[in-house]
Amino acid sequence: MPSYKAPVRDTLFLLNDVFDYARYDNLPGFSDASLDIVEAVLGEGAKLSEEVLQPLNRSGDEEGCTRHVDGRVTTPKGFKEAYKAYAEGGWVGLSVDPAYGGQGLPYFLAIALTEYSVSANQAFAMYPGLTTGAIAALQTHASEAQKRIYVPKMASGEWTGTMNLTEPQCGTDLGLIKTRAAPLADGAYAITGQKIFISAGDHDLTENIVHLVLARIEGAPVGVKGISLFVVPKVLVREDGSLGEGNRVTCGSIEHKMGIHANSTCVLNFDGARGWLVGEENRGLPAMFVMMNEARLGVAVQGLALSEVAYQNAAAYAKERLQGRALTGARDAGKPADPIIVHPDVRRMLLEIRAFNEAARAALLWAALSADEARRSPDAAARRTADDRLGLLTPVLKGVLTDTGFANTVKAQQVLGGHGYVAEWGMEQFVRDSRISMIYEGANGIQALDLVGRKLPKDGGRAITAFFAEVSAFLAQNKADSELAPYLGALKAASGQLQQATMWLMQNAMGNPDNAGAGSNDYMHLLGLTLLGFMWARIAKAVLAKKANGGLSEELEAKLVLAKFFNERMMPEAGAHLARLTSGAGSIMAMPAAAF
């Protein structure tokens, strides 16, 4: 039976020692989030995840959600009680504007806590996670009246939210959407159509579900320019805020999925359901992208979270499982065999996972702190810099962390051997659950294309130029530090290779766009590897600073070993990414389709 312990101390180390938490004191809302308060909130969130959510993970997977004859959906045993505890604890509205019932705490805190809840129970965490994304879209684009009707109830956890984009004939290509919106005399719209793959689309956790739905108003332009966004509640809301009759939206079926069985992924049928326009006509995509960008960072967290819980269980197993003898001789002659942690290849797998996890956690917190700066800083230049960084890193974090997170669950499963393949040890569930993160909220190939096609050239390459400048400045500031030097060489090399890749794309992608498509995945992973290397350099610097001030704990000493391992064993992959990227699209595009 798997277990989980939230990495609270590591989160606090990153905030305090790596990112100098005190430098954010000038941001509105941070005065209410001193490090002591942050520690207390993280501790309570960890307790909820470990004691309430994690024990339901396997049983929820086995039971799944049930659709009844009347279209109602029920969640697995224990989920309603767990959700009630989650909502009553104020966790849904943690970073929501207090004017609409939230606590107004910094966004980074919500991201850190999301890691804990997803590690404990990904399927459960998706219900409130989608709600916070829907809140973000409403807060940015809805009318004041709409905000007052929906956001407080969602922030309190009384209602949940969803996003409805995908239809049977379209996923990524939203210009193919067929769901219709017919204007009604009272200002509402009649929404008719079918949406598929709708996570948390129906359930029994709350009395209402607020669907955000992309649809095409009659007579709208074809393609993405004719898409509008609507708020469509499952239960209609009266003027006084009370609930009225049910709306004409029903769950037609629950998808039979590889994983996340305890989250109700629904086919939703809209049969003239009443909906209200959010924002401007034919401007639905910009409104929905607010939610999608929130969701993409949340999905990046899922990649880390499943990698973390898989690592914890694989490491515990490796220290206990007796099998074979160490290559250098028996470690414990009094036992029939040594624990498999003595074997170099087992250590390799565990170190690859952990070295990724700790750097990925740092990268996510840096991105989340950038989001807080972009939203809260009184300095316009600081807001722009932070927003540029967040825009550049979001597709990288979503793509790289979920690709690697899934691979890491497979490695952790491998550590357990045959026991990893059977259900009782929990590892095969981590593999199944983590697989979806590479697909939804924009498949990772789309993230790579978004990075190369949109984020790199945006504003004349301002964001990637700024990233190079940050890395170069760090290397220059620390080049005389002999203790830190062993942790900088690989970062310098990878940064140079990333710059070469960027220049190659600038020179070769315009004339042949297939070069951009063929190299986009390698570019995304090259940038991601450089980012993780940058995080390890900053972590090593923080650890060495603590060492200079009076010694290190075993936990911090381990970080220096991990930093060295990452530089020696993982950063060299940067060269392979560059070589593949600069080979161009020739061999990829040469074979005719009929030959496949």
Image (cartoon, rainbow, N blue to C red):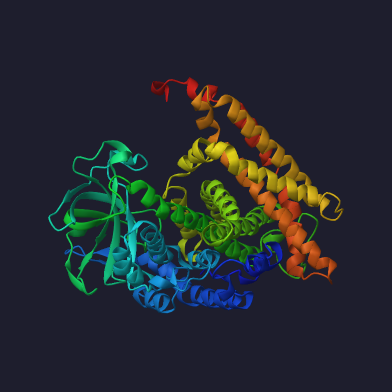
Q: Nearer the viewer, residue 488 or 3?
A: 488
Quadrant for the C terminus in the image: top left
Q: Position of residue 157 (x, y in %)?
A: 36, 72
Can you give x and y, in whole percent of width and height, for residue 390 in the image? 55, 51
In the rendered image, which quarter is residue 551 located in? Answer: bottom right
Q: Is residue 12 left or right of residue 293?
A: right
Residue 80 % position (x, y): 34, 75
> 71 or 85, which is in the foreground?
85
Viewer-proximal residue, 520 or 357? 520
Residue 458 visible, this orientation: yes
Q: Nearer the viewer, residue 154 or 557?
A: 154
Question: Looking at the picture, does residue 290 appear above or below residue 423?
Answer: above
Position of 237 with respect to 543 (left or right) is left
| Number of numbered labels in the structure image | 0
Give residue 459's quadrant in the image: top right
Q: Is residue 218 above or below residue 579?
A: below
- Residue 65 visible in the picture: no
Query: Measuring 60% from the left and 31% from the top, which residue is drawn there?
Result: 581
Q: Residue furthest left?
A: 185
Residue 588: horizontal and vertical position, in percent?
A: 51, 26
> What residue is rendered at 44% in x and 44% in y?
443
Direction from residue 345 to residue 297 in the image, left or right: left
